[in-house]
Image: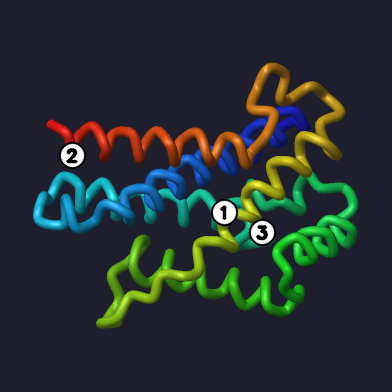
């Protein structure tokens, strides 16, 4: 896979993650209105699961095909700026990666023997996916991989959050 394809795919993973996290966040606010309807329960849970899977593709395993270190040229600077943006230490971010992997491995990829599912703090996933996308766009795109694509990952997240809210609001009116 050439650099352009790798950049493009990594960016798409960030955006897919963000869209699903936006939908998950927005639907959580309306949980009381749908918690007895299996369609919404399944959709809500699937938004979370897909977001975690996509996030783990870019952050979860350095050996993975789409891990951020495969395209980011200055790993040290990226990690320094990412952790500053998240307002956590690198050790805390590594711990967070572990939490996301546990959720992915124990409750999405497999159904292990655990009786309690702990959903990681999704604010970190949102902010780190937004940060990575912007970094790729602003620092790594030397081959026009994002021509005509999303210019701002925060705006992208807000757009889909608002879309999900609007659907729930319209549903409540019907």
Q: Who's the residue at 86% across and 28% down the image?
A: 142
Q: Quadrant of the C terminus?
A: top left
Compare residues 91 and 67 and report the one nearer the observer.
91
Compare residues 27 and 38 and report the one nearer the observer.
27
Q: Earlier in the sequence, mark 1 or mark 2?
A: 1
Question: Residue 84's image quarter?
Answer: bottom right
- Answer yes or no: do the residues labelled 3 and 2 have beta carbons within 8 Å? no
Compare residues 100 and 57 and report the one nearer the observer.
100
Q: Position of residue 156 (x, y in %)?
A: 57, 35
Q: Please name the residue that numbered disc 3 is placed on.
A: 63
> Mark 3, mark 2: which one is toward the viewer?
2
Question: Residue 78's image quarter?
Answer: bottom right
- Secondary structure of residue under mark 1: helix
Q: Position of residue 20 (x, y in %)?
A: 43, 44
Q: CA distance from mark 1 to mark 2?
A: 27 Å
Q: Who's the residue at 45% across and 36% down the image?
A: 160
Q: Please name the residue that numbered disc 2 is placed on.
A: 172
Q: Who's the residue at 81% across and 47% down the image?
A: 72
- Secondary structure of residue under mark 2: helix
Q: Please name the residue that numbered disc 1 is placed on.
A: 126
Q: CA distance from mark 3 to mark 2?
A: 45 Å
């Amino acid at each position: 896979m050439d650099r352009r394809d790798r950049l493009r795919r990594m960016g798409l993973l960030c955006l897919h993650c963000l869209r699903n996290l936006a939908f998950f966040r927005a639907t959580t606010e309306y949980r009381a209105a749908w918690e007895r309807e299996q369609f919404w329960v399944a959709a809500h849970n699937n938004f979370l699961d897909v977001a975690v899977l996509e996030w783990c593709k870019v952050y979860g395993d350095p050996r993975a095909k789409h891990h951020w270190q495969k395209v980011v040229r200055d790993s040290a600077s990226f990690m320094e700026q990412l952790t500053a943006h998240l307002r956590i230490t690198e050790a805390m971010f590594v711990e967070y990666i572990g939490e996301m992997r546990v959720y992915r491995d124990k409750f999405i990829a497999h159904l292990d023997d655990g009786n309690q599912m702990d959903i990681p703090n999704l604010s970190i996933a949102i902010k780190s996916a937004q940060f990575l996308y912007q970094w790729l766009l602003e620092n790594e795109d030397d081959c026009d991989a994002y021509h005509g694509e999303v210019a701002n990952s925060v705006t992208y997240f807000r757009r889909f959050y608002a879309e999900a809210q609007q659907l729930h609001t319209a549903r409540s009116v019907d």
